[in-house]
Amino acid sequence: MKQKHQYLWILPGVVILLFFLIFPLLSILYPTIMPDGFSLSAYGEFFANSFNRSVFWRTLKIASLVTFLAALLGLPTAYYMANCSAKVRSLLMGLVLFPLLINSVVRSFAWITILGRNGLINQLLASLHWVNEPIKLLYTESAIVIGSLYLFLPLMIITLVGVIETINPEIIEASRSLGASPIRSFWDVIFPLTLPGIIVGSILVFTGTLTAYTTPQLLGGNENMLMSTFLYQNAMTLGDWQLAGVIALLMIVVTIIVMKALNAMARQLDKRGTI
């Protein structure tokens, strides 16, 4: 009897998930597949439009690039932080966490003052006489990448620091004693052991970049629209809820595919299992 009643404890959580997550999601997705009977024509029409395809591929490109750069920059940074003294590590961790305490709108406006035509970078280039007129840095794909990387890099670093701290230092010392160079030791020993953290951090960064709205809107503008801003435009400005539902489902499917792909990659590189 006790085992039967144990399942009642999860009933409130299931009810909350159904009413506040599953049912609203189904109400958005239902019109995309059941306009006049079951049909996937809405998704065919989405990809038949060249503008829609460009927004879709631009989003995947930027999210993938930001994820790659976050892993590339985050792994050595996290390794250095994990091997610092406790006092220095606490200070560095505070510096990493500090941007997360600031609203994303404020952070995006800060980048506008840096990347704008009269921003800090253009003023510096002009003062050095490297350019004759301001170069366009704002409202470009590069601006979105920079802003998104600044936004989500702390998530990668925090995830990797927690994983690297669990690595036994004696394993690294053993590789060094066997003649492995620091680079070989890092690639053959440290990297495989940090792979679960890289996978988790990559999922967080990719999904965050894929779904972020404020940074792409403020730094990319309408000329470099991503799926998130495209979704908002169709839902809140144009009132096209069917197309908005199509975009939402595509973003969900892409997220699931990326998670499965990263886990499959982890299984190939690390036979110990998946996260």
Image (tube, rainbow, N blue to C red):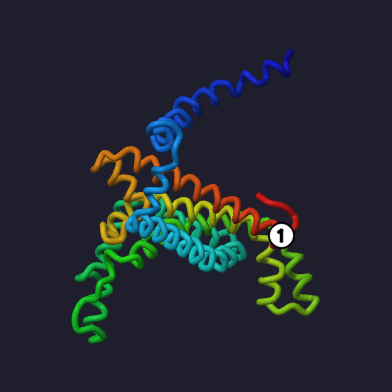
Residue 260 or residue 116, whichever sits in front? 260
Q: Image quadrant of residue 266?
A: bottom right
**As drawn, is 252 to the left or to the right of 267?**
left
Q: Position of residue 169 (x, y in %)?
A: 72, 64
- Looking at the picture, tell me which residue is in the foreground, 132 or 181: 132
Q: Quadrant of the N terminus?
A: top right
Which x, y percent locates residue 60? 45, 58
Decide which of 80, 117 is in the foreground and name it: 117
Q: Position of residue 207 (x, y in %)?
A: 47, 51
Q: Residue furthest top?
A: 1
What residue would you read off at disc 1?
270
Other residues around mark 1 within 10 Å, as few (<14) / some (14–19) / many (≥20)? some
Residue under the image location 57 percent in, 65 percent down: 75
Could you tell me which residue is drawn at 55 percent across and 51 percent down? 257
Task: In the rendered view, tell whether residue 215 sits above or below residue 177.
Answer: above
Label 1 element class: loop
Q: Is residue 250 visible?
A: yes
Residue 109, x across and y down, in percent: 27, 57
Q: Is residue 24 above or below residue 139?
A: above
